[in-house]
Image: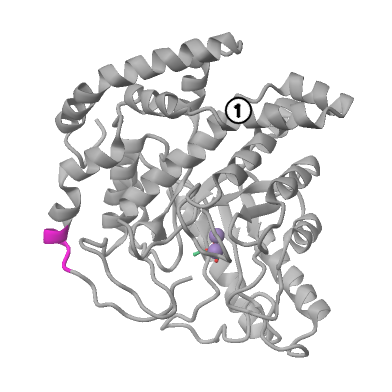
């Protein structure tokens, strides 16, 4: 049986108090949807099948380059991070896997770690390498870059680290490596755009050679930060070129926060899928830059429009549709467990809303250039409150109807606060 950090009785008791209100909301929504020709139970099943991975770095309190304010009961090691991820999954039921970041996650006994995860019913999603930061025991510095560095010794060290991440991942049952590099420049003239990209491609070919045949290699682009003038993999264009140059195991990862303000991300998603290079996502939200805020907290319409493209893509080419969904967020002002539960729900909400789009009516309006009706078709899906579907999906899967309320009632944060003494607040180092 699966180890559960929150008492099942507490969840059941809480659900008992909420089920009758939920049932009447669900029935009312079901009647409305059935007038629109939609079977609510089909949507609930789709919501139950939906999954997005938890970033291991998301369960700790994040920070900015100015300060870190440690939270109560922050996990001190990978086992405590897994326990927190298990809470997120137990209550929310949309996050059955964890994405590790090496060496932020100190992993040594890999079979023990794999067992600890499966004991909670959790699996491992994509591995993340880290060549944007120097580690104590490392001979070369990444101050001026990693996979694109001018010095071959630095590139070799970065390649070796990525290969090690693959090796660790293989022992844990992961099937993908995500590579994000901070490489870039702060001054015009600092480096040659072309030679940096050539060096990156050649180093990545060595990484690619170590990617097992049943694995994927995700390349993550980001417009700026920590480099402020230019970044080696700055956008989906460079990302697509790199993924294409490397081969079929390589594809592009879209982190929603890694674009210039107002960029049409949903269109990038459509383009990448159309040309077979949509690898996956880091979901989060942002107002200005790589803000790493909770999914759907700033621009839920954008998230819906991304899922509208995804649902459309799956309808058109189900055999080619397999993007990886991961959260990537980090917090200073909320409880990370609550925020991760909430983000997963918002991503799931965008998916279910996108399933409501009357795609054949939309295609008709598009063909007739009936702009108003085309837009209204999207809006009528987006304006539907699918909360009862999401709550019912959680309840049916054994989770909590209101997971945030259940989390607070369970007193988990206070309990771990007693077992895990607070870590010192240190500045910086948080991406
Ligand atoms: C870079 C990034 C990337 C890192 C994570 C910690 O901004 O989005 O995915 O691995 O943050
Ligand atoms: Mn990311
Ligand atoms: Mn980021």
Residue 300 horizontal/vertical position (percent): 54, 44
In the image, is 430 to the left or to the right of 251?
A: left
Instruction: State yes or no: residue 419 in magenta.
Output: yes
In this view, the residue in front, 302 or 252, is 302
In this view, 410 is above or below 190: above
Using the rendered view, name the quadrant where residue 120 is placed. Answer: top left
Residue 109 horizontal/vertical position (percent): 33, 58
Residue located at (56% from left, 33% from top): 351
Instruction: State yes or no: residue 225 in magenta.
Output: no
Residue at the outermost front position: 372
Q: Considering the numbered disc 1 on the image, is that residue within a helix, a strand or a loop?
A: helix
In the image, is 101 to the left or to the right of 161?
A: left
Residue located at (34% from left, 57% from top): 59
Residue range of the region highlighted in magenta in the rendering: 417-421
Using the rendered view, name the quadrant where residue 309 is placed. Answer: top right
In this view, 430 is above or below 12: below
Q: Is residue 159 visible?
A: yes
Residue located at (66% from left, 47% from top): 279
Using the rendered view, name the quadrant where residue 76 is placed. Answer: bottom left
Q: What residue does disc 1 label?
A: 381
In this view, the residue in front, 28 or 48, is 28
Which quadrant of the figure shows ligand 3? Answer: bottom right
In this view, 195 is above or below 187: above
> In the picture, which quadrant includes the N terminus?
top left
In the image, is 154 to the left or to the right of 364?
A: left
């Amino acid at each position: 049986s699966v180890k559960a950090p929150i008492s099942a009785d507490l969840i059941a008791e809480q659900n008992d108090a909420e089920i009758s209100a939920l049932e009447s909301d669900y029935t009312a929504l079901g009647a409305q949807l059935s007038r629109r020709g939609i079977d609510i139970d089909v949507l609930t099943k789709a919501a139950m099948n939906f999954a997005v991975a938890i970033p291991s770095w998301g369960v700790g309190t994040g920070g900015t380059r100015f300060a870190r304010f440690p939270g109560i009961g922050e996990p001190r090691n990978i086992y405590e991070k897994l326990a927190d991820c298990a809470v997120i999954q137990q209550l929310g039921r949309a996050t059955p896997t964890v994405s590790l970041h090496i060496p932020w996650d100190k992993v040594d006994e890999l079979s023990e770690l794999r067992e600890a995860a499966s004991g909670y019913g959790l699996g491992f999603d994509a591995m993340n390498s880290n060549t944007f930061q120097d580690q104590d025991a490392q001979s070369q510095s990444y101050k001026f870059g990693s996979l694109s560095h001018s010095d071959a010794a630095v590139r070799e060290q970065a390649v070796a680290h990525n290969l090690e991440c693959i090796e660790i991942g293989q022992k844990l049952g992961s099937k993908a490596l995500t590579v994000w590099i901070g490489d870039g420049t702060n001054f015009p003239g600092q480096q040659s755009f072309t030679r940096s990209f050539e060096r990156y491609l050649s180093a990545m070919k060595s990484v690619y050679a170590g990617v097992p045949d049943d694995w994927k290699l995700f390349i993550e682009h980001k417009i700026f930060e920590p480099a402020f003038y230019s970044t080696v993999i700055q956008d989906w264009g460079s990302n697509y070129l790199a993924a294409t140059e490397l081969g079929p195991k390589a594809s592009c990862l879209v982190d929603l926060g890694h674009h210039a303000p107002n960029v049409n991300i949903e269109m990038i998603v459509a383009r990448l899928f159309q040309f077979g290079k949509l690898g996956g996502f880091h979901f989060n939200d942002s107002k200005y830059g790589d803000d790493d805020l909770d999914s759907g907290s700033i621009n839920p319409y954008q998230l819906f429009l991304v899922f509208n493209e995804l649902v459309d893509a799956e309808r058109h080419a189900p055999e080619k549709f397999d993007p990886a969904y991961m959260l990537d967020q980090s917090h200073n002002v909320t409880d990370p467990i609550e925020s991760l539960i909430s983000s997963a729900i918002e991503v799931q909400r965008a998916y279910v809303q996108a399933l409501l789009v009357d795609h054949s009516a939309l295609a008709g309006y598009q063909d007739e250039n009936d702009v108003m009706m085309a837009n209204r078709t999207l809006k009528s899906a987006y304006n539907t409150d699918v909360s009862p579907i999401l709550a019912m999906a959680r309840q049916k899967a054994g989770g909590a109807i209101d997971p945030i309320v259940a989390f607070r009632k369970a007193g988990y944060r206070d309990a771990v606060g007693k077992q895990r003494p607070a870590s010192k607040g240190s500045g910086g180092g948080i991406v």
